[in-house]
Image (tube, rainbow, N blue to C red):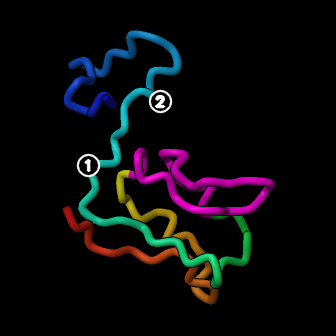
Amino acid sequence: MKEGWRKLPLGAIIPEAGSAEKFHTGDWRSERPIYHPDKCIQCLICFIYCPDSAIKVEDGKVVGIDYDFCKGCGICAKECPPKAGAITMEREMK
């Protein structure tokens, strides 16, 4: 079973290196980015600006979004070139 954000220690304590991979913090979202591969120009700006490293890249190309760690901040959609519009935000349905 995955460990959720409720299991994080109080006080911003990081008890061990590399522990972020254990905590799937994507359930904090109220909005979710939707990736449209047919519109993507592979500029990788979304990857550069994503504060959660949630943009999946393989062989130098964006291939999707890791919703286990995406918190729905919308930076990727905001930074995506307007003419491309490869990432849009939608209300999270839970």
Task: Name the secondary structure under disc 2.
Answer: helix
x, y percent for residue 5 = 26, 33
**Which quarter of the image is occupied by the N terminus?**
top left
**Which quarter of the image is occupied by the C terminus?**
bottom left
User: Is residue 60 depicted above or below 8 in this figure?
Assistant: below
Residue 85 quadrant: bottom right
Q: Is residue 94 magenta?
A: no
Which residues are drawn in magenta? 46-70
Residue farthest right in this picture: 59
Q: Is residue 50 left or right of residue 88?
A: right
User: Is residue 26 depicted above or below 15 in this figure?
Assistant: below
77 or 58: nearer the eye?
A: 58
Q: Residues within 10 Å of mark 1 (few under 14, many from 20)?
A: some
Residue drawn at x 64%, y 83% as measured from the top left: 38
74 or 29: nearer the eye?
A: 29
| Label drawn at residue 21 | 2
Asked if disc 2 and disc 1 are in contact, CB closer than 8 Å, the reply is: no
Q: Is residue 58 magenta?
A: yes
x, y percent for residue 64 = 57, 62
Residue farthest front in this picture: 1
Q: Is residue 92 left or right of residue 46?
A: left
Residue drawn at x 37%, y 38% as measured from the top left: 24
Q: Which residue was labeled with disc 1?
A: 28
User: Which mark sits nearer the N-terminus, 2 or 1?
Assistant: 2
42 or 79: nearer the eye?
A: 42
Q: For the residue marked with disc 2, what is the amino acid?
A: Glu
User: Is residue 48 depicted above or below 90 in this figure?
Assistant: above
